[in-house]
Structure formats: structure tokens, C-alpha cells
Amino acid sequence: MKKFSAIKIYTALCLMFASGTLLAQSPEYLTAKSDSCMIEASLAFNNQEAEKVKLLCNQAIEYNKSNDAAYYMLSKIYLMEGDNQAAENALRKAVGIDSSNYYYSATLGAVLVQNNDFVSAIKLYEWLINRFPSKTESYMPLIDLYIPRGQAEKAFELADRMEKNIGPNEQSTMTRFRLYSAAREHQKALDELLRADQVTPNEMYETYIADLYAGLGKDSSALVYYSKALEKAPDYIPALYGKMEVFKRYKNYPLYLVYLKSFMANRQTNPSIKKAQLEELLKDPILYRDYRNEMAGCIEEFARSAPSDSSVAISSAIMLARYGQAEQAGRVLDGILKYYPEDQYIRGNMMSFLYSTENWERLEGFVDTSLALFPDKAPEIFQFKGLSQYKLNKYDEAIQTFMGQEKYFRKRKDTLMLIQIYATVGDMYHNKQDNKTAFKYYDKALKLDPEDASVLNNYAWYIATSKIGELPDKKDLQKAVAMAKKAVENTSGEYHNLDTYAWVLFLNGDFAEAKRIMGQAVAYGGSEDSGILNRYADILTYLKEYDLALIYYKKALIKATENADQAEVDKITARLESLGKLIEAASQTTVSE
């Protein structure tokens, strides 16, 4: 009896545990487990834990194969990962489970378009519009599918249907406008917008109306509608740009520049678009000649519209410099340096700017700061420091700066840089009136490249002019002639080299050839250089071609005056006085004869 009871109790326990297991696997329990997984999946999704989301969603589906939310969340993860096909498969399952969920089907439609399954996408959007006629989000994707496939009638019908279901709206109006425009029915396109603007006036309609009028050559009507749009939205860029372009077509530059300035000040417009606009305007000679200050103001607005954008600042500074607005360009670069005081690229541009504007004192200090920030960049920026010291007549310091890099460039076997170092140091020793040392450095440069025209030209000039008030030795002068000739041969038509060659020929007694070569120097660009004009006149005077000499002395005087070079003005004035006496003497001799 006891044994039977034990068996009976054991059996009852087994049945009880068995019934407990069955209870645990009931549909309600599985659904609850699935929903619990989805709660965790949502948290993981918010934390951007993609793999965890996928694991939990798949667990949710194992518990409940009808969990449409799990498939939908999986589709979002697949889309984020760029796996559009997996997203499509997951969305099809979600829609299959719950076709009443608009967002499942709408998302599937967008994915079908991405997957180039346009036939399925069209069918799906058509079904969505029939099923959810008040959901405006489905109309435009379907219209965008109809139009490129030549289904204009269906697009028109859909626009009408959208307007019937939700009333007048931009989407239906712009659909008709697009269709009429594509068919080149410009009057119908215009009438559509005019009708819509009367019902619900807005800046977009009015800007398109203005654009159509402008395209038809009716600029007065275009200006009316651009103005209406800007009254509603003063910062509406399409209207602002359109109005600006009308004034440009009429060459009404003062008004054009007013609107250009507003366009440049707008912070919503892509800086690259504004930059392209300004660079195009740099080619306009009228703006460059007559409206430089106004253009500079527009460029400054461009810079102010993106105060922390280094590319905008540097572009603005370059353009301002091209318009001759060095002060404004400097302010723009100073402004961007406040944001990026240790940026190598910006500091490099600032050094180039200071060099180009010959701001030597600031350049010297700026390079010192840059070298402290980037000591490893010394070989790349030492020239800025050396040249600023050179221009400030700090020759000893400049020589030390240049020669301090000699070892580095020797090690790298950088011949070009070594030639530049030796040539520049040679120039400075010449300025120190130490020609013996200067010539040693020129010789070092020519040893590396015997054909370097710049070194040959300077060397020849300094030999020819180093003895004030007297000619150099005949041997040295012949050496100078040979070097100057080689410089000219290596740089055909370079007027500075022609000038040197002509002058050393003159000093060497080859007067006719000196005149011919100096005439070439003037013709090839030397007519803007008072020194060259003066030397040409000196040669002509020596050859007793007084009338021609007078012409070139006067031209030289004009250039020297323009350059505010008083020392040169005084020298040329003295030459003119001497020439006047020679002309008078020649005249008296002729009379007496």
C-alpha cells in the first residue's frame, strides 16, 4: 500500500511539472516574452547597439512569428547598415502580418524605389493611396515615379485627386507646374502658379512666377513678383538671387551689388555657391574697375556669414587682396586665427599674405611664433623670417637665418634651395657693401647650377655697378658681359635680364648693341620701370640722340613720380637739366656752322 502511494505521488508530481511546462509554453506566455524582447530591443536601438537589436528582434520572432514590430525594427537596422535587400525582406514580412499599418507599407515603398523595383513600388503606392487617401506622403513619391516614365496623365489625375482629398496644396500645384514646364507649355505653367498664388499666396509660387517671367524676357513683371516674395520672406534666397540676376542683366550694378551683399550675408546658403559666384565676378572688368569697394563689402559679408569656416576666410582674404583691399584681407585672416590660432594651414596663409603685402615687421614676429609652435617646420618657413629680416635691413640676422638651414638642405641634397640660400645671402653681402664675400656666395650658387639666370643676372649687375663713379676692371667687365648674355639666352624676353645685358654692353663700349638690347628691354615690359627708361635715355644721350632721349627721360620721370620714388625723381630731373644744356649747346653749334 505504501509502495502504491509512493508511485502515485511520483506520478502526480510528474503530471504537475508537465502541466507547468505546458503552461510556460502557452501563446500568452510566448507573446509576453516576445514583447519583453522588443522593449529591450527599443532600448538597444536608442543606444545604437545594432547587433544587440538584431539578436533581440530575432528572439522576439522565435517567440512570436507574428511580431510585425520586430520585422519593422530589423528593417530599420538593415537600412542603417545599407543592406536594402534585407530591409525589403523584413518589411514585406511586417506588411504581410499587418497591412493596416501605413508606415510599414510607406517604408517598403521607399525601399522598393531604392532597390529599383519601380513596378512593385508603383503598385504599392497606388494601393496605399486607395487605402489611405488622406495620407499626403504617398502622393508625391508616386507622382515622382509617374513623371519620368511618361505617365503624365496619371500624374495630373493624382494631383487632382490629392487636391480633392485635402484641398489646395503646394504639392498638387507644383506637380501641375512641373508637368506643364516639362511639356514646354509655359503659359499653362504660369497660369497654374498665378491661380494658386491668388488662393494661397506664398513666396515659393511668386519666385517661380518671377522666374517664368524672367525666362520670357519680361523682367519688369519678374521684378514685381520677386519683390512680392521678398516682402513675405526677406531672406528667401531663390527670390533674392533671382532679383539680383535681373539687375545684373540690365547692368544696374549699384542695385545688383546691394542684393549681392544680402545674398553673401545669408548664412543658410552653401558657402561653395557663394564662393563660385564671387570668383565668377572677379572676371568682370567693370566691377573690378568701378566698384571695387562695393565688391570688397560683399566679400567681407561672405566671410562674416561663416566666421569659423577657415576655407571661407582664406578664399575671402585672397579675393580681397586681388581687389587691392589688403587691410580688409588682413582683418579676415586675423578673425579666423582667433578660432584656430595653432592651425598650420591658416598660419601658412597668413605668412604668405604678410609677405605679399610687405608687412615685414609683423611677418618677422609672426614667423617667430609659428616656429615656436611648429619647430619641425623650420625648413619650410625659415625663408619668411629671413626675407622679412632682409627687407628690414637686418642683414646679419637674415644671413644667420638663411645659413642656419644650409646643413639641412645639404643633407637632403636640395640643390634648388641651396642656390636660393647662396644667392640671397650674396645679395645681402652686396647690400652690406662686402662684394668680395657676395661674389663668393654667387660662385657657390653657380657651382651648383652654372645656368641659373637669376644668379647670373645679379652677379653681372653687381660686378658692373659695384665701383661707384668708375668702371670695373676690363676683365671683370667682360666676365659680367658673358654672364649677362647667358642669363638672356636662358630666359628669352625677360626684360630685367635684357636691361642688365644692355647696360654692361654699354659700359664695355658696345654702344650700338647696348641700344638695340635696351630697346628690347623697354618693349618687353621695361616701359613700366623708371630705372630702365632712365638707362635707355642715358644710352641715347651718349649716342647724341637727344630728341629720343628727352622722350624717355620724361617717361621715366612720370613712372618715378607715380611710384613716389623721390630719389629717382631727383636723379631723372638732373638728367633732364643736363640734357637740356646738351640740346642747347648742339643747337648753338648748328647755328654757328
Image (cartoon, rainbow, N blue to C red):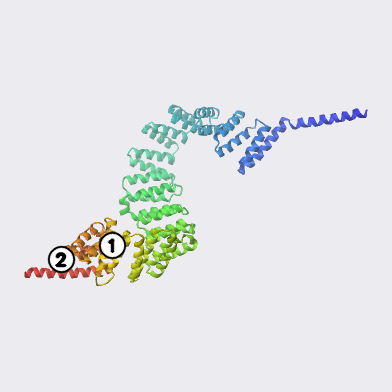
The residue where tag 2 is placed is 544
Foreground tag (2 vs 1): 1
Residue 382: where, in percent of width, then height? 43, 62
Disc 2 on helix, strand or loop? loop
Q: In front here: 499 or 439?
A: 439
Q: Residue flagged by tag 1: what amino acid is it?
A: Met
The answer to whether the residues at label 2 and label 1 have Cβ atoms under 8 Å apart is: no
In the rendered image, residue 223, in percent from the top left (x then y), is placed at: 36, 43
Q: Left or right of 389: which side holds 554?
A: left
Residue denoted by label 1: 483
Residue 408 percent location from the top left of the image: 45, 61
Question: Residue at image x 46%, y 58%?
Answer: 337
Q: Is residue 374 visible?
A: no
Quarter location, residue 47: top right
Nearest the viewer among 438 and 212 is: 438
Give the quadrant of the C terminus.
Answer: bottom left
What amino acid type is highlighted by mark number 2? Answer: Lys
- Which residue is outermost to the bottom? 469
In the displayed structure image, the side of residue 448 where residue 2 appears, left or right: right
Q: CA distance from mark 2 to mark 1?
A: 29 Å
